[in-house]
Image: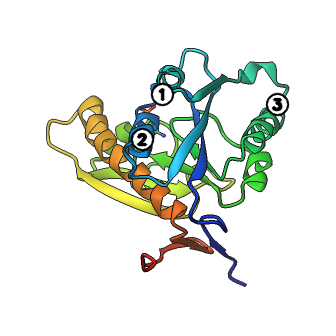
Amino acid sequence: MLVRFRSGRVNMTKKINLGVLISGNGTNLQAIIDASEAGSLDAVVKCVISNKVSAFGLERARKHGIEAIHLDHKQFENREAYDAKVVEILKERNIDLVILAGFMRIVTPVLLEAFKNRVMNIHPALLPAFPGLDAQKQALEYGAKVAGCTIHFVDAGTDTGPIILQKTVPILENDTEETLSERIHKEEHKSYPEAIQLFAKGRLSVEGRRVRVLPEADK
Ligand code: GRF
């Protein structure tokens, strides 16, 4: 049987609450905050959690008056215990959608079951090609001619969940990992808010592996 899931919440007039998990710079986080503040996103970033104390994304959150939480994974016995604490924090803040934005940790069923079909990730490659680490380097070394980014719902695998959006960029003759990453990043910053907005508007229907983008509701 095909299990269907429709995104969004019952009261669609309200903005949805986002909890963003990061480990680093947080340029995607920044793009999401900017879109939210500009009013082009029916979502607000309620809290940012980082497993790394030095993550610049925490600083970005604070600058915008967003709660920034450092949750050190080394303080927890295993991944499940860490995720249980993450779930507790997110639930306390009524988070509707969990956004992984450069979160360099594997998430466990503890988080995925608590937020079923409500965890998104962005990956700097056109999945299913080049999953895992160093995706841009993998694409270059393979000799691919196009690259891009993928936004997907997270499942128990590594970068294997149902795909929401993909954007392509060319790979140029003289590209290095840095120049390609920069080109991909630019697309990421447009695409992540776009995918979140589709979710917030209840326009994503997950049917098995396929995510259907439903037409915009009449205003
Ligand atoms: C992005 O390239 C994203 O695709 C990957 O991690 C990177 C995070 O970059 N998952 P930033 O911290 O948002 O700048």
Tell me whether the residue at label 1 lies in contact with that at label 2, contact meaning CB atoms closer than 8 angstroms.
Answer: yes
- What's the residue type where badge 3 is placed? Asn
Is residue 213 at least partly visible in the picture?
yes
Spot occupied by residue 123 in the image (x, y as percentages of width and height) = 46, 46
**Residue annotated with mark 1:** 64
Numbered disc in front, either 2 or 3: 2
Vertical comparison of 188 with 24: above or below: below
Among the two numbered marks 1 and 2 on one chain, the one whose residue lies closer to the N terminus: 2
Residue drawn at point x = 42 percent, y = 41 percent: 37
Using the image, determine if residue 19 lies above or below residue 41.
above
Q: How many marks?
A: 3
Q: What residue lies at 44% left-to-right and 49% top-to-bottom? A: 130
**212 relative to 36, above or below:** below
Counting from the top left corner in percent of width and height, residue 140 is at 30, 41
Residue 63 place in picture, x, y as percent: 47, 22
Q: Nearer the viewer, residue 177 or 50?
A: 50
Image-quarter location of ligand 1: top left
Ligand 1 contact, mark 3 (Cβ < 8 Å): no
Q: Which residue is mark 3?
A: 78
Give, as a three-letter code, the residue at label 1: His
